[in-house]
């Protein structure tokens, strides 16, 4: 079954609002319900890709809390925190480490309109000292209660929604695909529209086929490849 035009329009509408310059990095956040809630928030605010380092190096698992958002927000795994940090810094991100210590700054006093990565720590232990030392700034969300910290997925939501609030005020929220460069847009829309064909192309080491304006593949592919979404 080919991709329905309305489905393609919907994929474009969502991708048009994605941003490659807003992300998160999770250090050893392992609980499926937290990972799921975090990716769901990333999807909601328009994060293109999230990052994670896991102690166990296991494939992350999600549950129904994710509502399928893991299909729409790529979670890139890194083996070590320093590798993830170098990757993000190399791509121009400013790293905001969440930290409940006294030297951290109230997140509302920071400017998240430029390339921004929020770094969040493990459910039990928070951000490691090693990671904390690699951050550009330490930030915190002020707390008034008896419990010292928020759930990690709640903290992620607060920070991401603050980032898009600031970007909206500055007129920086993408509406027409300007949050991604053209090649990344083209690659992502193909992967969203035809994930099985994309996997096949990767295995074959070949370029993705071109799509026409209706989202149809413009070349004839082997009949064994499923076009179905
Ligand atoms: N005992 C840990 C600590 O002292 O850091 C608590 C970890 S907390 C449950 C898990 C993660 O949620 C933290 O590493 C941080 O990323 C985020 N977080 C929770 N409350 C926060 C707050 N008030 N400000 C900023 N980040 C917070």
Image (tube, rainbow, N blue to C red):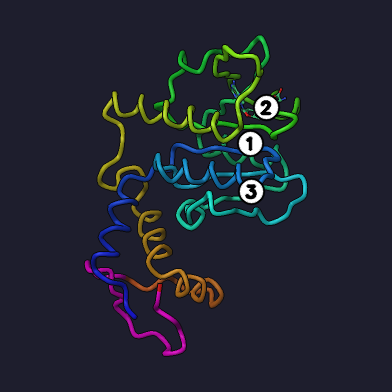
Along the line of sight, the residue nearer the viewer: 31 or 55: 31
Looking at the image, do the residues carrying marks 2 and 1 touch, with CB atoms under 8 Å apart? yes
Query: In which quadrant will I find the N terminus?
Result: bottom left
Residue 77 disc label? none
Residue 85 disc label? 1
Q: Quadrant of residue 29?
A: top right
Rounded to the nearest whole Å, what is the CA distance between mark 3 and mark 2? 26 Å
Q: Which residue is found at the position 42% from the left and 90% from the top?
A: 223
User: How dense is the environment of label 1, judged by Cα within 10 Å: few (below 14), some, or many (20 and up)?
Assistant: many
Q: Is residue 135 above or below residue 33?
A: above
Q: Which residue is found at the position 31% from the left and 35% from the top?
A: 173
Percent x, y of residue 227: 39, 78
Range of magenta residues: 211-228
Relative horizontal placement of residue 219, taking residue 147 as reference (left or right): left
Rounded to the nearest whole Å, what is the CA distance between mark 1 and mark 3? 23 Å
Looking at the image, do the residues carrying marks 3 and 2 touch, with CB atoms under 8 Å apart? no
Q: Is residue 129 above or below residue 12?
A: above
Rounded to the nearest whole Å, what is the CA distance between mark 2 and mark 1? 7 Å
Q: Which residue is mark 3?
A: 32
Q: Quadrant of ligand 1?
A: top right
Q: Quadrant of residue 155?
A: top right
As helix, strand or loop, the secondary structure at mark 1 comes to: helix
Q: Which residue is found at the position 28% from the left and 52% from the top?
A: 13
What residue occupies the far top of the structure in this picture? 102
Percent x, y of residue 127: 70, 29
As helix, strand or loop, the secondary structure at mark 3 comes to: helix
Q: Is residue 226 magenta?
A: yes
Q: Which residue is mark 2?
A: 134
Percent x, y of residue 41: 47, 41
Percent x, y of residue 63: 58, 54
Label 1 near ligand 1 (CB < 8 Å): no
């Amino acid at each position: 079954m080919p991709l329905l035009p309305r489905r393609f329009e919907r994929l474009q509408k969502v991708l048009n609002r994605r941003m490659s310059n807003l992300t998160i990095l999770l250090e050893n956040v392992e609980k499926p319900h937290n990972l799921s809630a975090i990716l769901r928030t990333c999807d909601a605010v328009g994060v293109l890709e999230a990052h994670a380092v896991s102690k166990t190096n296991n494939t992350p698992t999600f549950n129904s809390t994710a509502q399928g958002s893991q299909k729409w927000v790529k979670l890139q795994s890194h083996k070590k925190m320093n590798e993830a940090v170098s990757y993000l810094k190399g791509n121009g991100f400013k790293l905001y480490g969440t930290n409940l210590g006294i030297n951290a700054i109230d997140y509302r006093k920071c400017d998240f309109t430029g390339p921004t990565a929020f770094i969040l720590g493990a459910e039990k232990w928070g951000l490691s000292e090693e990671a904390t030392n690699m951050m550009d700034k330490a930030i915190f969300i002020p707390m008034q209660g008896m419990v010292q910290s928020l759930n990690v997925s709640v903290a992620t939501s607060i920070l991401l929604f603050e980032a898009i609030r600031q970007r909206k005020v500055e007129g920086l929220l993408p509406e027409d695909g300007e949050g991604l460069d053209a090649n990344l847009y083209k690659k992502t829309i193909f992967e969203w529209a035809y994930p099985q064909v994309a996997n096949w192309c990767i295995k074959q080491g070949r370029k993705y086929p071109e799509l026409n304006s209706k989202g149809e593949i413009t070349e004839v592919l082997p009949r064994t490849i499923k076009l179905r979404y």
